[in-house]
Image: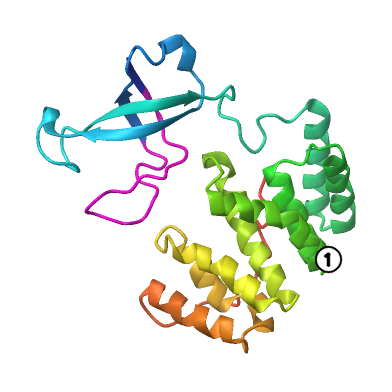
């Protein structure tokens, strides 16, 4: 069977081109699925986890090639979710609460927003975007000790690459916020360990790496040995010394939609 779809999560590398994972991320590809493993009806519109192998140049040549590339999918696991992500599974009641949260954030009523989000959390209806929002609200309220508890699961997702395209932003920004709050709490070694996770894919996470060198929240740990070591690695990853274009503050767009 020939299927087409968008790659929403990837551990693949372009062998011989780059050692960084995430090849084909967000790209739409067509691939062959052995008919004996799954039918079209079984996978139509669903998320599938697969092993991907590349076939080059009409069956000849050596991988990777640039032209006439084909893909074979094996080890197929079909998910019941149909593009599940940040808001896909919200109940009408939960969605109404998220709307109130958005209104509260628009007026910077962080206390109300925190209360609404905590209510969702108590009902196990706090999704990935909601976790990030609640963590950001607690940071705005200068309650980093509470924020780290909320944000730690996002960091765990980040480490395991347990996210899809529509949840990548709150996961990566939530992880960065987690590092910021650990710094504010003077937990230097933990904060820099989180930041080092961005260095693994320096091109993909260039924004976070550059921002870390300028953000004022990391001023709490800049005299530590772990920060000094991270700073050297971060500047090397960026290819140039830190040029501090801004103060790293996040006053707009931090909470997302």
Relative depth, front residue between 113 and 165? 165
Q: Position of residue 62 (x, y in %)?
A: 13, 41
Relative depth, front residue between 74 and 179? 74
- Locate residue 94: give its quadrant: top right
Q: Which residues are magenta?
A: 4-27
| Up/down of 112 relative to 52, above or below | below
* Residue 118 in sight from this viewpoint: yes
Q: Residues within 10 Å of mark 1 (few under 14, many from 20)?
A: few
* Residue 243 in sight from this viewpoint: no
**Which residue has dot 1 on it?**
141
Q: Residue at x 89, y 52 (%)?
A: 112
Q: Main secondary structure of the magenta part?
A: loop
Which quadrant does the N terminus fall into? top left
- Locate residue 59: give its quadrant: top left
Q: Residue at x 41, y 14 (%)?
A: 38
Q: Seen from this angle, which residue lies furthest bottom?
A: 223
Asked if the stretch drawn in magenta spans residue 182, the answer is no
């Amino acid at each position: 069977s020939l299927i087409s779809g968008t790659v929403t999560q990837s551990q693949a590398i372009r062998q011989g081109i780059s050692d960084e994972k995430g090849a084909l991320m967000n790209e739409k590809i067509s691939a062959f699925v052995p008919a004996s493993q799954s039918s079209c009806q079984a996978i139509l519109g669903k998320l599938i986890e697969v092993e991907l192998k590349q076939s080059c140049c009409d069956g000849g040549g050596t991988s990777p090639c640039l032209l006439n590339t084909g893909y074979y999918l094996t080890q197929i696991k079909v998910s019941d979710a149909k593009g599940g992500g940040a808001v896909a599974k919200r109940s009408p009641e939960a969605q109404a609460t998220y709307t109130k949260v958005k209104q509260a954030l628009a007026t910077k009523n962080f206390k109300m927003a925190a209360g609404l989000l905590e209510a969702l959390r108590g009902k196990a209806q706090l999704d990935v975007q909601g976790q990030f929002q609640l963590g950001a609200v607690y940071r705005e309220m200068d309650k980093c000790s509470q924020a780290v508890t909320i944000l730690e699961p996002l960091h765990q997702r980040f480490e395991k690459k347990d996210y899809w395209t529509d949840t990548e932003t709150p996961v990566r920004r939530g992880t960065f916020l987690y590092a910021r709050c650990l710094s504010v709490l003077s937990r230097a070694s933990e904060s820099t360990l989180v930041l080092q996770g961005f260095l693994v894919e320096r091109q993909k996470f260039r924004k976070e790496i550059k921002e870390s060198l300028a953000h004022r929240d990391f001023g709490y740990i800049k005299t530590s040995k772990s920060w000094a070591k991270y700073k050297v690695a971060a500047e090397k990853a960026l290819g140039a010394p830190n040029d501090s274009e801004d103060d790293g503050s996040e006053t707009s767009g931090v909470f997302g939609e």
